Amino acid sequence: MRSIATMIAVACAMIALPAAAQKEKPEAKTIADPKAPVVFAPRIAPASATDPENLLYLDLSTGGRVVIWLRTDVAPKMVERVKTLTRQHFYDGLMFHRVIEGFMAQGGDPKGDGTGGSTLPDVPAEFNYLPHVRGAVAAARADSPDSANSQFYIVFQPRLSLDKKYTVFGRVLEGMQYVDAIERGEPPANPSKIVHAYVAADHPPAYAPAPVAAPVTLPATTLAPSTATKPAAKPVAKKPATKK
């Protein structure tokens, strides 16, 4: 009887321990139910596609204006960089220096060879869920994920293997035909250019093609007969004489 009474007393004493003392023992980990639905973290509402502050205009030398929806909800730092450079007229006159058929057109490099950028610091990676589909606009970078700066590319055809490896920050809404017309090459022989870049909120003028340079005409002059020695005629192989 004494042993039973002792056990009851010990059990009562354990129950009466403070909560802090009881939690000193590690709690058992529960195994998640494999059949339970997967819950993802809530996404931020997409940036408005009608807000002029989220629209980038690229007037291209290929004949028209490209309207790009900027996704501040997934890549706010890169969007802010592009808008800052646009308002500094950084992109005006820059060429598309790397254009690969069936892949993408890359521009935004003041050097024109893929090694240049702006004087601003590089932008950290903002990899997100947006896919590399036709019309996607993403930040070009070097080997480091945090090396994006001013260069960007526009995708011709889906390239989903690049997803979550590069920062997609926009999508072409209008004018994709002018992107398709960009001259191909690495670099192109006759590169297409960004005539002007604007943020829609800045009330840009309507698209105007780049002025065509007037043909150069030389003044009429009286030319004296040339006394220069004519180059020797190239030797011509003679056919062997035929016997009569």
Image (tube, rainbow, N blue to C red):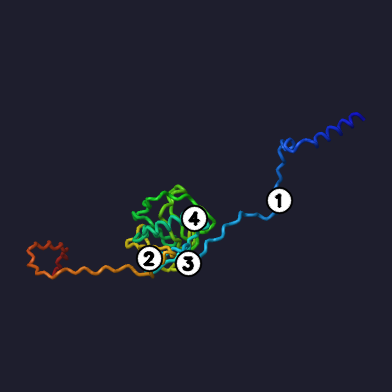
Q: Earlier in the sequence, mark 1 or mark 3?
A: 1
Q: Earlier in the sequence, mark 2 or mark 3?
A: 2
Q: Position of residue 172 (x, y in %)?
A: 46, 64
Q: Residues within 10 Å of mark 3 (few under 14, many from 20)?
A: some
Q: Earlier in the sequence, mark 3 or mark 4?
A: 4
The amino acid beneath tag 1 is Asp
Residue that numbered label 3 is attached to: 173
Q: Earlier in the sequence, mark 1 or mark 4?
A: 1
Please say if 204 is above or below 79: below
Instruction: Please tell me in which quadrant of the rendered image residue 20 appears.
Output: top right
Residue that numbered label 4 is attached to: 76
Looking at this view, is 162 or 82 the one in front?
82
One can see residue 119 in this view: yes
Q: Residue at x 41, y 56 (%)?
A: 84
Q: How far apart, in angstroms, are the residues tagged by discs 3 and 4?
A: 19 Å
The amino acid beneath tag 4 is Pro
Q: Position of residue 231 (x, y in %)?
A: 12, 62
**For the residues carrying marks 1 and 3, which lies nearer the camera in this image?**
3
Residue that numbered label 2 is attached to: 60
